[in-house]
Amino acid sequence: MPLIVGTKNKAKIELIRRALDSLNFNIQELPDQEFPEIKENGETALENARIKALTYAQLIGCPVLSMDNALYLEGLTDDRQPGLHVRHINNRLDRPSDLEIIAYYSKLITELGGKIKGYWEYGVCMATPDGKTQETVFRSPRIFVSKPSPLVIDGYPLESLQIDPGSGKYSSEMTPTEKDKFYSERSLTGQKLREFIINLPNRFVD
C-alpha cells in the first residue's frame, strides 16, 4: 500500500521507511514536480507537520504524511532551547551547513558537561486533500555527546552527536541492519509511528 511522505529530507524519509517496514507500506517521496515554498511558521512541531501535510495533500490530490520535530536539551534554560529552530544558530539569517550545525552543538554540549540527555518532540500529521487530519505528538529521549563522529548523515547532522544506548555506537555510524533493528525493536519513534499508522481511519490509507 502506498504512503506518500511530505518532505524533501531524504534522511527523514528513510527514518519513516525503516520505522514502518513491518507494516508493508510502500513509502513514497513527493512527486517529481515543482512545489511552492511552504512557510513552516507554526509554534509547535505538530503545527508545522499539519501545515506541510495539508498543503501537499491539496497540491497532489491524495493523503500525505508529514512529520516535524523539535529538540530540547537537559541543562538549558527555556530561552536557550533549540526547539523548532535547530538550524537557527548564532543569530544567522542563512541556512548553516550540516558541519556548522555539528560544530555549534558540539561546543554547546561541551559547555553542558560533554554528555547530556535530551529529547526530540515529534509532531505527526496525516492529511487528506479535503482537509481532514489525524495527528499525534510524542517525545523520544536521546543521549548527546560533544565529540562528533566523522560520519555525517546528510539532512540529519545531529546523528553525529547522538549515541545509541543499545549498540553504544554513534547513530550516524550504525549499519543499515543495526538501524532496521533499532527502529523495529528499540526506538520509541518507530513504535509511536507504527501505532499512529495502524490506528488511522480507512479514509487516510485506502
Image: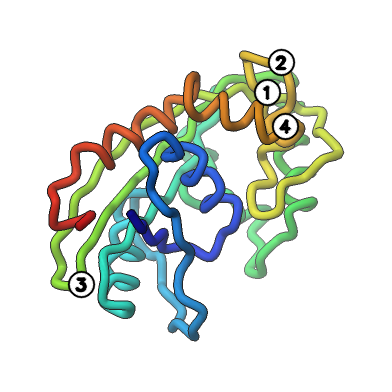
Q: What residue is pinned by disc 4?
A: 175
Three-letter amino acid code of the residue under disc 1: Ile
Question: In 3D space, how far apart are the residues under numbered discs 2 and 3 (Cα atoms)?
Answer: 43 Å
The answer to whether residue 108 of the structure is visible from this angle is: no
Q: Which mark is residue 206?
A: none
Q: What residue is pinned by disc 3?
A: 129
Three-letter amino acid code of the residue under disc 4: Thr
Three-letter amino acid code of the residue under disc 3: Pro
Percent position (x, y) of residue 114?
75, 21
Percent position (x, y) of residue 36?
44, 83
Q: What residue is pinned by disc 2?
A: 168
Q: Tag 3: Cα neighbours inside 10 Å, few (<14), some, or many (≥20)?
A: some
Question: In 3D space, how far apart are the residues under numbered discs 3 and 1 (Cα atoms)?
Answer: 39 Å
74 and 150: which is toward the camera: 150
Q: What residue is pinned by disc 1?
A: 163
Three-letter amino acid code of the residue under disc 2: Gly
Quarter holding the C terminus?
Answer: bottom left
Task: Tell me: residue 32, above or below residue 168.
Answer: below
Frontmost of labels 3 and 1 is 3
